Image (spheres, grey):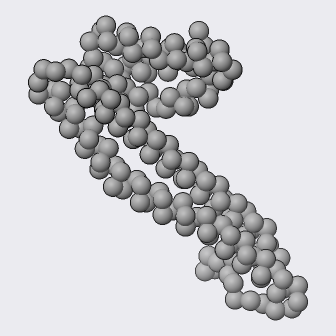
């Protein structure tokens, strides 16, 4: 067995400690068979583990599903259910707007920074010193000949940051959707 798969399953097993031993074994067997089936169909182990996501989040969704399947009422089950919805709802209030707005802002900033660098470089080429400041620390300002390379680097950084945030937001929404579908299907 691959070391990464073993490590992932060990982490998942630790997170499933609240469940009964048989139920935990069934879940681990299901996840392991899913991994090996995907790998045998040509997917890489890293891709499959990345698709499954964080073991803690996967365990939380399985735990909440087990709580809902259990028809008997107990205070521990209620506390876990409330915790699941509280964490999901409260984190969504902050993660979605902040990451969404930052992603869009970084995307537009990447083009604005590059455009400003190109405009200042063209102005310098024709003998005009435009008041576009690039890296001004108060006591030091980047020399004019470094404007375009600095703007290209920062534009690329803004663009990469925008893409990373966008993918993170999509992954977060997908994980919430999967958890919701599991809760809905178990009712």
Looking at the figure, which quarter contains the N terminus?
top right
* Residue at the spot 62% in from the left edge and 70% down from the top edge: 109
| Location of residue 106 with respect to 180 vertically, above or below | below
Q: Nearer the viewer, residue 107 or 185?
A: 185
Which quarter of the figure has residue 21?
top left
Query: In this view of the protein, can residue 98 be seen by the observer?
Result: yes
Number of numbered callouts drawn: 0
Q: Is residue 73 left or right of residue 47?
A: left
Q: Is residue 136 left or right of residue 89?
A: right
| Location of residue 114 with respect to 97 vertically, above or below | below
Q: Is residue 177 left or right of residue 183?
A: right
Q: Nearer the viewer, residue 73 or 53?
A: 73
* Residue at the spot 73% in from the left edge and 71% down from the top edge: 114
Looking at the figure, which quarter contains the C terminus?
top left
Question: Where's residue 103, x and y in %?
Answer: 54, 60
Question: Where's residue 73, x and y in %?
Answer: 11, 24
Which quarter of the figure has residue 26?
top left
Tell which residue pokes out farthest to the bottom in this image: 128
Query: In this view of the protein, can residue 56 be seen by the observer?
Result: no
Question: Where's residue 47, x and y in %?
Answer: 61, 29
Which quarter of the figure has residue 28?
top left
* Residue at the spot 29% in from the left edge and 43% down from the top edge: 87
Question: Where's residue 75, x and y in %?
Answer: 11, 28
């Amino acid at each position: 067995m691959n070391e990464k798969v073993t490590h992932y399953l060990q982490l998942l097993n630790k997170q499933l400690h609240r469940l009964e031993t048989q139920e935990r074994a069934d879940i681990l067997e299901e996840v392991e068979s899913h991994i090996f089936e995907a790998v045998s169909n040509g997917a890489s182990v890293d891709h499959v583990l990345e698709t499954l996501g964080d073991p803690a989040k996967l365990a939380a969704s399985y735990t909440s599903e087990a709580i809902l399947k259990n028809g008997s009422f107990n205070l521990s089950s209620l506390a876990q259910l409330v915790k699941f919805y509280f964490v999901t709802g409260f984190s969504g209030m902050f993660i979605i707007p902040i990451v969404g707005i930052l992603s869009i802002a970084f995307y537009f900033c990447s083009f604005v920074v590059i455009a400003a660098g190109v405009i200042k470089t063209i102005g310098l080429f024709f003998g005009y010193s435009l008041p576009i400041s690039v890296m001004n620390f108060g006591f030091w300002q980047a020399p004019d000949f470094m404007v375009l390379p600095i703007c290209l680097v920062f534009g690329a950084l803004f663009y990469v940051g925008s893409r990373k945030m966008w993918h993170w937001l999509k992954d977060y929404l997908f994980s919430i959707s999967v958890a919701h579908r599991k809760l809905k299907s178990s009712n």
